[in-house]
Amino acid sequence: MPVLVMKFGGTSVANLDRIRRAAKRVGVEVAKGYDVIVIVSAMSGKTNELVGWVGETSPMYDAREYDAVVSSGENVTAGLMALTLQEMDVPARSWQGWQVPLKTNSAHGAARIEEIPTDNITAKFGEGMRVAVVAGFQGISPEGRITTLGRGGSDTTAVAFAAAFDAERCDIYTDVDGVYTTDPRVAPKARKLDRIAFEEMLELASLGAKVLQTRSVELAMRYNVKLRVLSSFEEQSDTAGTLVCAEEDIMESNVVNGIAFSREEAKMTLVSVADTPGIAAAIFGPLSEAGVNVDMIIQNISEEGLTDMTFSCPIDQVKRAEKALNDAQAAGSLAFESLEADTEVCKVSAVGIGMRSQSGVAAKMFKTLSDEGINIKVIATSEIKISVLIDRKYMELAVQALHDAFELEKA
Ligand code: ADP
Ligand code: ASP
Ligand code: MG
């Protein structure tokens, strides 16, 4: 029988009523003749609570124990979903990641999936089971420890299962009815897209649109998984939601198709470093070794052989970045006058594959922000995106102004 993957996010399994509602949707697909693999998240808010408990218990926590704790929310919803289905006379059972086993590498907190053996679940389908409920977000390392796939990782579990089982489709049920031109909670004029290209979705996700985890889009693109995002609160239909698909399958497209933003950014400046060959390596080498994800970089004009180097990184990595650079200074491999951290910034990005062939997008973006009196602190561009770092207090204003300027409310 054809296999369908259905993933339910935190708000879609937030309480027993919602789990029942989700289970009914699963029942509809089972009645159509599908064998269904259901991937569940933890109840909404649960993972945040668990992450908080870990931090309170141990600020410099052991990542293996972090994973043991934060993966547990999904165990509860997987069992409850299986029980709910059984109550509806749908043959179902639950699997935790290690039982599948969903094998990952040992990068605790951000593990990558290496293999999903299908024999175990396929055998159960052969015996008449109709739904395999799998706890999302978690796997098992080569050392036999529980791992997690990074925040939002259940999306990636779902796409990986769809690829492994050659599923007909991977449906991601969430609290919005599809992918929008920007987060509808920030810009009420945001428009739902019927289709979006993998490349654009990948950029939007990696630039902060958390509707899909970046890695899930990467996997869907690589294995050509038919990926759909839709609401678990609205009526079901075969054309609901947004289809994430190949560029060729999209008839028409605007130059800019989406605005993404990320609040969790910080801007760091090393003041007065020597402007000599090797300076970038002396700065970014230690940062990389310390696991700091540096994003945007600018080197300022040099005066008397000294320059300022500015970069951005996730706000929760500021302490780690400071330590790495101060250690490098203490060890004598780097010299700077001071290190300044600005934690009141955010990143706003415009994304569109049309940018490859059309110029003027950057100019329009900068003019729009300047008309609103918003100062741009750092700029970064790639083939299909332009990102700026601005003061966080202007984030909503910038997103809305750019949405208007690029007329994203119009198809
Ligand atoms: P889930 O718990 O179902 O995984 P998430 O909270 O991870 O749900 O993702 C859904 C949220 O993503 C929406 O509630 C919305 O606020 C946010 N979001 C950000 N950007 C977009 C976008 N471009 N389109 C739709 N939703 C977006
Ligand atoms: N529960 C996990 C999180 O909140 C994984 C997920 O929901 O995708 O990050
Ligand atoms: Mg999510």
Image (cartoon, rainbow, N blue to C red):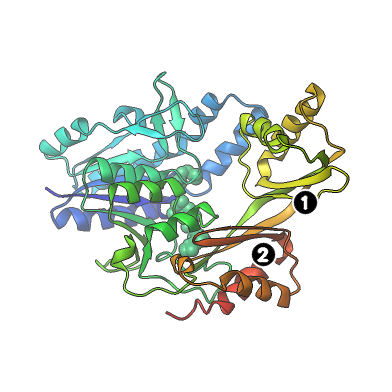
**Image quadrant assignment for residue 268:** top right
Residue at 53% of width from left, 77% of height from top? 189
- The nearer-to-camera label among 2 and 1 is 1
Q: Which residue is mark 2?
A: 395
State the image coordinates of residue 122 (x, y, percent, origin top left). 17, 36
Q: Is residue 296 above or below residue 97?
A: below
**Image quadrant assignment for residue 179:** bottom left
Instruction: Describe the element under mark 1 as helix, strand or loop.
Output: loop
Which label sits on residue 81? none
Instruction: Say whether residue 31 is visible.
Output: yes
Residue at 82% of width from left, 32% of height from top? 335
State the image coordinates of residue 193 (x, y, percent, origin top left). 40, 70
Which of 179/365 is in front?
A: 365
Query: Looking at the figure, which quarter contains the C terminus?
Result: bottom left
Instruction: Say whether residue 11 is visible.
Output: no
**CA–CA distance in space, label 2 to label 1:** 25 Å
Q: On the rendered structure, is 67 left or right of 314?
A: left
Dot 2 amino acid type: Met
User: From this viewpoint, which residue is outermost toward the top?
Assistant: 143
State the image coordinates of residue 248 (x, y, percent, origin top left). 30, 65
The crowd level at tag 1 (other Cα within 10 Å; few <14, some 14-19, many 20+) is some
State the image coordinates of residue 392 (x, y, percent, origin top left). 71, 60
Dot 1 amino acid type: Asn
Residue at 77% of width from left, 50% of height from top? 342
Q: Which residue is mark 1?
A: 300
The crowd level at tag 2 (other Cα within 10 Å; few <14, some 14-19, many 20+) is many
